[in-house]
Amino acid sequence: MILINLGRLLMLVVWSFLLFNLIQPFPKPLKYFLDIGLFFMVVMHALQLTLQKATLTKDEAKPGAAFQTRVFLFGVFEMVAWQKKQRAQRLSDRGR
């Protein structure tokens, strides 16, 4: 779990760096690279959120806005934490 939290922290640093480039642009070659990186990050995290929603079964509860925001911000790190939580919940349900 420590590695997941470390990954989340890393994602916050990356988001901050990319968004800072919008407020205070870096010199030209780096600015364009970071703009492309931000675009790629937004598209990939939105795609991940969309795929996560599409794979839910009808039995599972729809994710709330807070969870969707965390998936968008932290990406794969939030998904791994969610999968671990789901797996633990299934195991505890089987034990009953």
Image (cartoon, grey):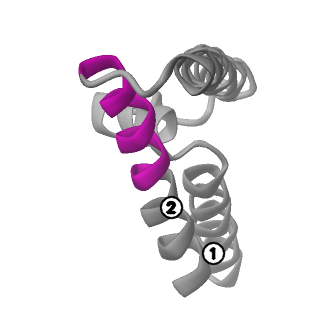
Element marked by disc 2: helix
Mark seen at residue 17: none
* Residue 1 visible to the viewer: no
Crowdedness near tag 2: few (<14), some (14–19) or many (≥20) residues, C-alpha within 10 Å: few
Q: Amino acid at mark 2?
A: Leu
* Residue 59 visible to the viewer: yes
The residue at the point 65 percent across, 22 percent down is: 33
Q: Amino acid at mark 1?
A: Ala
Left or right of 22 in this view: 9? right
The residue labelled by disc 2 is 10
Indicate whether residue 37 is drawn in magenta: no
- Pointers 2 and 1 in contact (CB under 8 A)? no
Q: Which residues are magenta?
A: 12-23
Above or below, 44 relative to 76:
above
Identify the mark nearer the N-term, 2 or 1. 2
The residue at the point 72 percent across, 22 percent down is: 51
Q: Work out whether residue 68 or residue 92 is closer to the camera in this orientation and state it.
A: 68
The residue at the point 58 percent across, 36 percent down is: 60
Crowdedness near tag 1: few (<14), some (14–19) or many (≥20) residues, C-alpha within 10 Å: few
The residue at the point 68 percent across, 27 percent down is: 48
Mark seen at residue 88: 1
Number of numbered markers: 2
Element marked by disc 1: helix
Left or right of 18 in this view: 86? right
